[in-house]
Image (tube, helix red, strand yellow):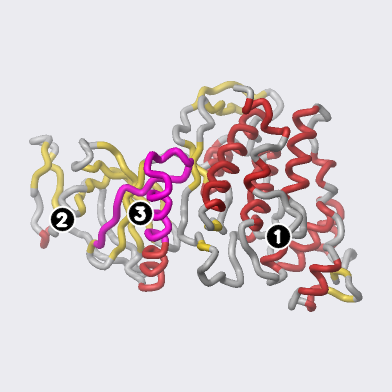
Amino acid sequence: MGVTGVCSACKGFLSCFSLSSVRCDDDDEGHLLCQDGYVLQDRYEIVSTLGQGTFGKVVQCIDHQREGSRVALKIIKNVEKYKEAARLEINVLEKIKEKDPENKQLCVCMYGWFQYRGHMCISFELLSLSTFDFLKQNNYIPYTLEQVRHMAYQICSAVEFLHANRLTHTDLKPENVLFINSNFTTCYNTDKQCEEHVLKDTAVKVVDFGSATFDHEHHSTVVSTRHYRAPEVILELGWSQPCDVWSIGCILFEYYLGYTLFQAHDNREHLAMMERIQGPIPSRMIRKTRKQKYFSGGRLDWDKNSPTGRHITHTYKPLCKYLLRESEDHCQLFNLLEMMLEFEPERRLSSSSSLHHPFFSSLHDL
């Protein structure tokens, strides 16, 4: 297929450029270089770039075969390992679509995919800001408890659907939860002394299935982004669906307080933070792990008097100490977090059980 442009003078979908005049190549890292206004496959007119990462980039397009509706197009780098990852992601997305043909399970919907000049391209429904980007643009003012409740229920519902279909997402984080519409009103926050964005709608969907893994597939040793990584992953004890629930617990804490729970840079530091939050790592996990270098005498081996040790001791505290209010609703949230951040995956709350937690009872009554 050639690349075409949109001529604003005739306001139509015309072949205004020849291939030789269109700058649409790869950069040194394998990203597709293409300007806004160009069209892929005589169909997808690029409007803007939504984001770029190690995998490639995501652009907003007008889909001229879907009545001019807007879509998100994920353009994978022209690098074999990323293309292979894209093929695996497409397989997961096709299975999700097969199990959820009406797109009701709060996972982003894939419309289709194609190859273009060595790039795998995946077309998705167009969503809005991620829950992380909104938080960042809002000066890290935490979400309200009611917003946390609604978002939490949706995330747990989407993940329960995945788990019921023998899938583990493995990379749940605020960046991978997107608002369907992030429109907001503005008010002045007297405590923060700044303008605050107040969301009009907290409907969300889970995205990015590039690392999602079926139960029967090979399980990589390390999964999840550092801050949301479960202890069994760090200790290389094997992982399955419960690692997603740990990640959800970390996400909800971040929504509630406006900052990351585990701001760790290495495994030993991360485990020390976990112990400050949730108490000692269970001896059963310590005995089973191959990572004995982190332990001595059956206990975590770290120097409390080192600069990092003093920082953790002074900065981190038991989970319940982070409560902003002692009301029943706030206490219910922290009870849910305690159960999601259980060290042992076998004892951790399941995604299906989380939906029946008292924290969500008010949503069931609606």
Residue drawn at the location 59% of the way across and 59% of the way down:
225
Label 1 sits on what residue type? Answer: Ala
> x, y percentage for residue 23?
20, 59
Instruction: Look at the numbered discs 3 and 2 and tell me whether their residues touch, using CB distance below 8 Å.
Output: no
Which mark is first along the chain, 1 or 3?
Answer: 3
Taking 355 as reference, is 128 left or right?
left
User: Considering only vertical position in the picture, is 222 above or below 198?
Assistant: below
Q: Position of residue 133 (x, y in %)?
A: 52, 42
Image position, residue 241 (x, y; %): 61, 57
Q: Secondary structure at mark 2?
A: loop
Q: How many marks?
A: 3
Query: Three-letter amino acid code at disc 3?
Result: Lys
Q: Earlier in the sequence, mark 3 or mark 2?
A: 2
- The alpha-carbon separation of the residues under discs 3 and 1 comes to 30 Å
Residue corresponding to mark 3 = 74
Q: Determine which quarter of the picture holds residue 80.
A: bottom left
Q: Which residue is mark 2?
A: 3
The reply to whether residue 102 is visible in this rendering is: yes
